[in-house]
Amino acid sequence: MTLRSARSLRPACLLLPALLALSAPVHAQSLPEPSATIKGTLVLPVPVGNPLFNAYTEVLGQVDGTYQHPLYKGLGVGVGGKMTWFGVKERALAPIITSGDISKLTLFGKVQYEQYTSARTFYELNARVGTSTFTFSCPTCTDDSRRTVLHWALGVGYYIHTSDNLAFGLTLGYETDATRFHANDLGLPDGRFPGRKEVEEAHPFQNLLIGLGFSTRLRRADDEGPGW
């Protein structure tokens, strides 16, 4: 090796230890572990696969709350509930004049996998199984319209921390309930929708779910924050 080449390598030799020193804390830093968490979500449910329900109702909204606890390497379980509201379109049922709303209370158990992608971001994959209770409230509705059915759902969420324990994120999901929408649910005469034929082969209640949520970790915040 010539003297000139040795001199040209000197800056690289001086820079290498500095780069190693700077990179060492990054590699040594471990990602946060999932903890017991409370999650809440404001959801826009989009009904799919049920044209009769879409024709006679409109979406009002959904709220969702969950407590969850980690078990092993991001895998955990949880419990929760959510309320969903739909409004009855008054003009859609002409010449029958009625109005009101449809509410759905869902109680569920949850299995989730949660993983941090950096010190301040994480994602969640989840599956839920439970029961939904439908209540139809309108002048022509009867008590027979209330029923409880099987519910299941799949979802994914991506969250960004704004503090050590508080994060906000976007959620997407799909849910279905094991029942269909009938004219008798609204107490319509002869059990038929005005001017339309009830489709017996219609799919069960199904919704695509688009939500904005928060996540609160139930543990003491670190004095130095979560590493950012």
Image (cartoon, rainbow, N blue to C red):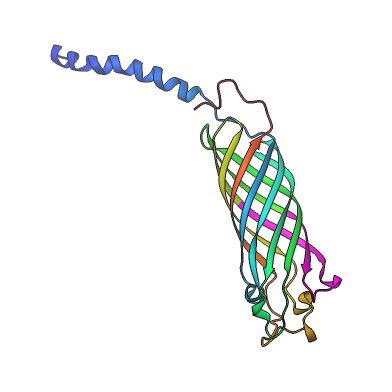
Q: Give x and y (percent) for residue 27.
A: 47, 25
Residue 36's quadrant in the figure?
top right
Q: Give x and y (percent) for residue 164.
A: 58, 30
Q: Give x and y (percent) for residue 96.
A: 72, 83
Q: Residue at x 19, y 14 (%)?
A: 6
Determine the residue located farthest toward the top in the rendered image.
3
Nearer-the-camera pick, 85 or 10:
85
Indicate left or right for 45 with 128 as reference.
left
Determine the residue located farthest toward the right in the rendered image.
143
Magenta segment includes 83: no
Please identify the dominant SS of the magenta region: strand
Residue 197's quadrant in the figure?
bottom right
Indicate left or right for 4 with 198 as reference.
left
Q: Give x and y (percent) for residue 188.
A: 77, 81
Q: Is residue 41 above or below residue 2?
A: below
Q: Residue at x 28, y 15 (%)?
A: 13
Magenta segment includes 130: yes
Nearer-the-camera pick, 131 or 104:
104
Q: Residue at x 69, y 32 (%)?
A: 218
Q: Is residue 191 above or below residue 162?
A: below
Q: Is residue 173 above or below residue 184?
A: above
Magenta stretch in the rendered image: 129-155
Q: Is residue 143 above or below residue 32?
A: below
